[in-house]
Each structure stands twice: as structure tokens, then as C-alpha cells.
């Protein structure tokens, strides 16, 4: 299917893991709590919602994915963001693990900006190509993490089967390696970078994620999550597995 850069057959497997694993639910509850902290307003849109579990944590969210599945409210492409005709612009647009699947991420930012109210936010949580992230994802994750391939103007060729695309180093490449070009490109769309933070070290891999069994009891994972939340950013910048990015729409 045109524009599809992700294998949707993974969704049923993810839904089964969600039901089975309390540790996984605990991990994502922490991620959605973080997202919620940075979203503003009530008109909240999620892109690339996958199995749509965000609504358990953000009751007002509209869940979407590139195709309409049983798991989401509606189909929506990150390149062609819409809103119901009667609704004012979105106050917040968020996505977890979407950006690194986009072959044209700047087209996503352009589209998001058009549909975002002034003062509205884009909140993204992505894999982080830190020292720890590189090591972890290279050893234990099937998708590529190639920071040198993340180059302006940030347009990429498919690198998987059937036009699929992934580069786990996307956020780090754009925001850290090429921050000048990235920030200038965002300015064209009246977007500014408000916050970049790193998170997640042990609890996420030990939860087993969507594809492995849970390695520790849920109580221990909670303790790890608490410990990690106390780690300073100068440590997480080196070992964090995820990066949080918050953008804000300025008046033009
Ligand atoms: C790695 S999954 C993440 C799913 C979910 N957000 C989570 O954290 O579990 C990436 C999701 O992005 C969606 N996606 C990929 N390309 C997209 C596009 N161009 N527009 C909207 N969604 C897209 C995929 O269908 C998939 O559901």
C-alpha cells in the first residue's frame, strides 16, 4: 500500500503482548504519563497509534494510524493530517515511535504545523541513538540504527521489504547531529524546539517490550522506573534508550 512503511501484521502480536504483560503496560503507562505532561489543550491527536492503547491513559485522545484498523478511531497519514470540519485546530499532536519510520519527516512537521493551533505542541517519543541506545538496539532490535544516514534535507529511501523504512537514529540525527539545519527547517513551519530530554535505561528492556517475555516482576520494573526518573540528564544523554522531543507552534 502507498505510504505504508511499517508491517501492520505486527499489530495483533502487539495486542496479545499488551494483554499478557503487566510490565509492558507499566512501561507504556509511564510513557503516556510523560506525553500527557507535555500536551496542552483538549484537542489531542495521536499519529501512528498502533494498537491504540493510549486512550487508556489519555481519555480525550483521537487515535489514528496510516490505515483504519480495529484498534484506532480513524485512518490518518502523518503527511496529511486532518481534523473534523467543525473542530478548531488540534491543540496537541503526539506520536510514539513514528518519526523513525517516516521517509520524509519534514513533510510530517509541515502537515502537523498546518493543523496545530498557535501555542499548540507536537510531542514525540523516539528511540535514542545515545551510546547506550546504539549498543542496545544494535544487539537486540531488528531495525537499523544508522546515524550517518540521517542527513539534511532529511529525505530517505526505503530500506526494508515492500517499501518499509526505519532508522532508529532519526531523532538523534536530526536534533543533535544536524540541529542547525533542523531548527531552520522547523522555522519555515513556525515550529520551535521547546524541550529535548532522554529517558529509559533498564526498565524498558527488562519489561521485554512487545516481542520478548517480561524478565522481572512488575514491582521491580516499577522500582527501576522510579530510579531512572531520578537520573540526571547528563547521564541519560549517554545511556538513555529513548528521547522525548517537544515542539511548539509560534504565531506566524
Ligand atoms: C513502531 S509502530 C509504533 C506504534 C505505537 N505508537 C507504539 O508506540 O506502540 C509505528 C506506527 O506508525 C505507523 N506509521 C508508519 N508510517 C506512518 C505514516 N506515514 N503515517 C501515519 N502512521 C504511520 C505504523 O503503521 C505503526 O502503527
Image: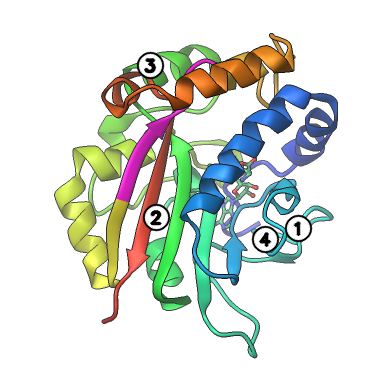
Left or right: residue 184 compared with residue 74: left
Res. 212 mark: none
Q: Are marks 4 and 1 in contact (CB under 8 Å)?
A: yes
The answer to whether residue 91 is seen in the rendering is yes
Q: Which residue is mark 1?
A: 72
Q: Which residue is mark 2?
A: 105
Real-space CA distance between mark 1 and mark 3, rounded to the nearest whole angstrom = 33 Å
Sequence order check, earlier mark of 2 and 4: 4
The answer to whether residue 158 is seen in the rendering is no
Real-space CA distance between mark 1 and mark 2, rounded to the nearest whole angstrom = 22 Å
**Badge 3, how many Cα within 10 Å: few under 14, some, many 20+?**
some
Q: Which residue is mark 4?
A: 64
Q: Are marks 2 and 3 in contact (CB under 8 Å)?
A: no
Residue furthest to the left in view is 180
Q: Are marks 1 and 3 in contact (CB under 8 Å)?
A: no
- Where residue 204 appears, as percent x and y from the top left, is 57, 22
Sequence order check, earlier mark of 2 and 3: 2
Left or right: residue 173 compared with residue 20: left
Amino acid at each position: 500500500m502507498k505510504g505504508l512503511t511499517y508491517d501492520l501484521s505486527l499489530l495483533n502480536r502487539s495486542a496479545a503482548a499488551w494483554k499478557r504483560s503487566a510490565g509492558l503496560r507499566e512501561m507504556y503507562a509511564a510513557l503516556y504519563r510523560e506525553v500527557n505532561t507535555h500536551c496542552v489543550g483538549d484537542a489531542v491527536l495521536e499519529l501512528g497509534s498502533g494498537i491504540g492503547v493510549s486512550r487508556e491513559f489519555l481519555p480525550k485522545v483521537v487515535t489514528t494510524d496510516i490505515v483504519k484498523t480495529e484498534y484506532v478511531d480513524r485512518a490518518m497519514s502523518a503527511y496529511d493530517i486532518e481534523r473534523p470540519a467543525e473542530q478548531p485546530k488540534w491543540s496537541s499532536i503526539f506520536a510514539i515511535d513514528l518519526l523513525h519510520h517516516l521517509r520524509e519527516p519534514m513533510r510530517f512537521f509541515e502537515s502537523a504545523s498546518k493543523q496545530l493551533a498557535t501555542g499548540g505542541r507536537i510531542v514525540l517519543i523516539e528511540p535514542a541513538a545515545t551510546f547506550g541506545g546504539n549498543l542496545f538496539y544494535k544487539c537486540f532490535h531488528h531495525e537499523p540504527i544508522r546515524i550517518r544516514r540521517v542527513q539534511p534535507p532529511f529525505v530517505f529511501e526505503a530500506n526494508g521489504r515492500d517499501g518499509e523504512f526505519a532508522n532508529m537514529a532519526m531523532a538523534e540525527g536530526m536534533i543533535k547531529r544536524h540541529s542547525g539545519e533542523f531548527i531552520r527547517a522547523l522555522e519555515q513551519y513556525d515550529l520551535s524546539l521547546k524541550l529535548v530530554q532522554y529517558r529509559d535505561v533498564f526498565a524498558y528492556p527488562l519489561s521485554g517490550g512487545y516481542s520478548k517475555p517480561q524478565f522481572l516482576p512488575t514491582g521491580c520494573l516499577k522500582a527501576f522506573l522510579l530510579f531512572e526518573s531520578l537520573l540526571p540528564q547528563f547521564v541519560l544523554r549517554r545511556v538513555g534508550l529513548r528521547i522525548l522531543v517537544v515542539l511548539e507552534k509560534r504565531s506566524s
